[in-house]
Image: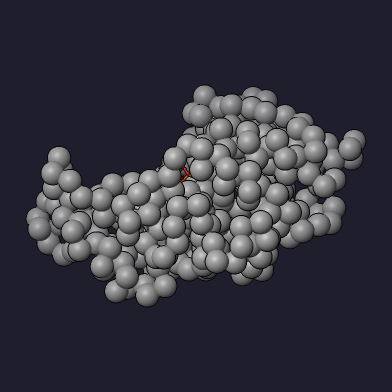
Amino acid sequence: MSEEQMNSANKPISADGRTYHVETKEGEMANRIITVGDAKRARALAQHMDKILLERESHRGFVTITGIYKKLPVTIIAIGMGPSMMDFFVRETRMVVQGPLSIVRFGSCGSICDAKIGDIIVATGAFAITRNYRFFSHQEEKPYILWPAVASDDKLTRSIASKIAQPLGTDHVFAGLVGNADSFYGSQGRTGSDFYDANDALLDSVHDSYSDAVALEMECHMLLHLAQVSTGPDGSLPPSIRAACALMVYADRQGNKFISPETSKRMVEVAARAVLDALVEDMPSQEGLHPAAGSV
Ligand code: R1P
Ligand code: URA
């Protein structure tokens, strides 16, 4: 394919087949993917793989590590923060990986339930919380919009929850709906006097709208939404992406506490194998075989 044919405004792809933001090409990413926010977390997880095949950092900060775990190819990718970064990652990954995709987000969150720092929350589903700009211009409507929830892949979610409960204990694993906010601050109900955020009642309205809301963060809904609307070859259905989310509690919103670096490091070590095991068991066959797997 010529450069002209591949590189378009619709789908910017370099002459050597790399997507514009994530900068990966066919053969570099596996069909089993763990996505995290932080590159350090990605590298800590990658230490648990049996072999690392490649690591690449893009000019937009995406860090992609592909390796082998229990004889199967797995990619771990750090995407940074927010729904737009999740959108770049999922769409550009779909451009370069053929076949089904299983994606697990292993992130951090603020707990709005009884889960405390050091606990893990698995998402049964997620909803978006967006700032309503009309309110801030005209004081019309409500200041925040709570969108309908999208479900996680049930089998993958249950598998992650039961595997994480083994090292952590069932008392430390929670499940429920996750609110995916468009800010760490205003639309997660963090208050202060530097900006007029009109968010004093936001957490109450989250609980009123979703009695099973357990956590707030910034990417789960976009992942589950894109999985929901993903299509098979040539635009066919059913969806080609299955997705689930497991979140470490970094902020205890009820107790107003935040995690220490030592505890966050320990949590990754405790959960790493559970997340990797759930992912490879979810797609155990040669389905979606990465070219490098043959040489393992
Ligand atoms: C905010 O500190 C970031 O932490 C959470 C939020 O979703 C947001 O991206 O997730 P990660 O720790 O995976 O980045
Ligand atoms: N990530 C978030 O988005 N919110 C929190 O409170 C903690 C981590």
Task: Name the image quarter holding the C terminus.
Answer: top right
Q: Is residue 216 above or below residue 26?
A: below
Q: Can you tell which quarter of the image residue 52 is in?
A: top right
Q: Position of residue 288 (x, y in %)?
A: 78, 50
- Foreground residue, 236 or 213? 213
Q: Position of residue 64 (x, y in %)?
A: 63, 34
Q: Can you tell which quarter of the image residue 214 is in?
A: bottom left
Q: Position of residue 32 (x, y in %)?
A: 70, 49
- Foreground residue, 252 or 188? 252
Tell whether 107 sits left or right of 77.
left
Tell whether 26 sits left or right of 184.
right
Q: Is residue 292 above or below residue 14?
A: below
Residue at image location 72% in from the left, 40% down from the top: 48
Residue at image location 85% in from the left, 53% down from the top: 286
Q: Is residue 287 above or below residue 96?
A: below
Is residue 189 among the parts visible in the rendering?
A: yes
Residue at image location 82% in from the left, 47% down from the top: 70
